[in-house]
Amino acid sequence: MQPTHEESHGGALGARLNWLRAAVLGANDGIVSTAGLVVGVAGATDSRSALLTAGLAGLLAGSMSMAAGEYVSVSTQRDSEMAALAQEKLELREQPEAELRELTDMLHARGLSREVAREAAEQLTARDALRAHARVELGIDPDELTNPWHAAWASFLAFTVGALLPLLAIVLPPPAVRLWITVASVLAALVLTGWSSARLGAARPGRAVLRNVAGGALAMAVTYAAGALLGAVGA
C-alpha cells in the first residue's frame, strides 16, 4: 500500500495540529477571561461605556500578555534547539566515528538489525550527518525550527478573536437582556472550544466540554457576584 498524505508527512501534520490546538486554547482563554471581566463589571453597573472600556482593556491586556509570553517561551525553545544543533555539529566534526556508532545504536534500538542499522547510519551520514542526528537523536527538524514571532502573532490573534465574543455580546444588546445574551453566547462558545480541543487531542469530548463550560460558568458567576457586591457597597 502507498502511504497516505498524512502518513508520509506525519511530522508536518503533527505541527499543524499543535498550532491549531494552541489557537483553540488561546481563543478559549480570551472568551473566559474577557467574559469574566465584563460580567463582573455588569454586576456593578449597566453603563455601556464602562462595559466597553473594561472589555477593550481586558482584550488588549490579555492579547498582549499572551503574545509576549508565547514569544518568550518559544524564543527559549528555539535557543535550546539552536544550542543542541551547534553542539551536535561540533561533535560530528571532532569525533565522527563515535557519532556514527551512536547513530547506529539508536537505529538498532528502534528495531533494525545491527547490519542494517549500520548501513542506514552510513547512508544518512553521507547524505546529511547533522540532519540525521538532529532528527533521530534530538527529535529536531532543522528545516522547521520554532518561530517565536509566528507563535506570538498566533496567540495574539487567537485571544483577540475569543475575547471579541463576550465584548460584543455585552455592549450591543439592550441593557435588559445583555447579561443573559452574554452568558448564553459564552457558554455556547465554550461548548465549541471544548469539543474542538478534545477532538484535536483525540479524546472524548463529553468531559472536556463539561469542564470547559463549568469553568466558564463558575468564572462568570464569581465575577458577577463580586461586581454586584462592590457596586452595592459603592452605592
Image (tube, rainbow, N blue to C red):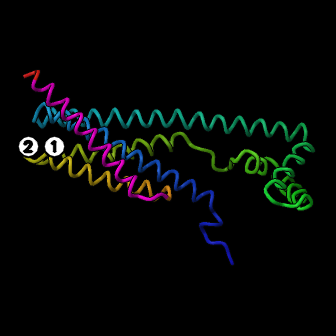
Asked whether, in this view, residue 24 is left or right of residue 83, the answer is: left
Question: Picture quarter containing residue 75?
Answer: top right
Of residue 98 and residue 148, the one placed in the foreground of this image is: 98
Given this view, does label 2 or label 1 mark the residue nearer the observer? Answer: 2
The crowd level at tag 2 (other Cα within 10 Å; few <14, some 14-19, many 20+) is: some
Amino acid marked by disc 1: Val
The magenta segment: 203-232
Q: Is 19 above or below relative to 32?
A: below
Quadrant location of the N terminus in the rendered image:
bottom right
Task: Let me know if residue 190 is in the magenta part.
Answer: no
Q: Residue furthest top?
A: 234
Along the line of sight, which residue is nearer the eye, 63 or 120?
120
Residue at (26% x, 49% y) in the render: 186
Measured as percent of width and height from the top left, residue 89 is found at 80, 40
The residue wearing badge 1 is 171
Residue at mark 2? 175
Main SS, magenta residues:
helix
- How far across and down, in percent of the image, does residue 104 sit? 87, 52
Contact? badges 2 and 1 (CB < 8 Å)? no
